[in-house]
Image: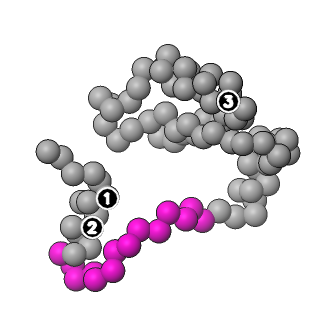
């Protein structure tokens, strides 16, 4: 019924004549960003599996209940993952 936001971006690109709108999922980050991540996570995360949870969606009705995010984090931890939460505005 409703398209994903990426489909909207593709439609816009097509409308303005962009032929190749293959998405790039590479996030640019600086050496300072990497150093801060290392500081926050600690070096032990490098030797282990990392499970990242970003508990936010573009629409409030798509967000999970906090208990469900917690259950997911507990399950990932039980499987041997270190769990990190990300976020933004």
Q: Residue 41: name its quadrant.
A: top right
Q: Residues within 10 Å of mark 3 (few under 14, many from 20)?
A: few
The relative height of residue 51 versus residue 68 in the rendered view (above or below) is below
Mark whose residue sits in front, 2 or 3: 3
Q: Residue furthest front?
A: 79
Range shown magenta? 15-28
Q: Is residue 61 left or right of residue 48?
A: left
Do tag 1 and tag 2 residues touch (Cβ < 8 Å)?
yes
Q: Position of residue 65 (x, y in %)?
A: 42, 20
Q: Nearer the viewer, residue 22 or 17?
A: 22
Pointer 2 or 3: first along the chain: 2
Asked whether residue 39 is in view, the answer is no
Q: Which residue is label 1 attached to?
A: 6
Q: Which residue is label 2 attached to?
A: 10
Q: CA distance from mark 2 to mark 3?
A: 37 Å
Residue at the (62%, 22%) spot, across then down:
74
User: Is 16 one of the magenta-colored residues?
Assistant: yes
Q: Which residue is label 3 attached to?
A: 79
């Amino acid at each position: 019924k409703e398209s994903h936001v990426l489909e909207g971006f593709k439609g816009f690109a097509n409308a303005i004549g962009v032929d190749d709108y293959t998405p790039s999922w590479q996030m640019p980050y600086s050496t300072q960003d990497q150093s801060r991540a290392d500081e926050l996570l600690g070096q032990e995360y490098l030797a282990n599996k990392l499970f990242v949870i970003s508990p936010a969606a573009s629409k409030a009705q798509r967000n999970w209940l906090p208990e469900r995010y917690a259950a997911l984090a507990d399950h990932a931890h039980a499987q041997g993952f270190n769990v990190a939460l990300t976020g933004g505005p």
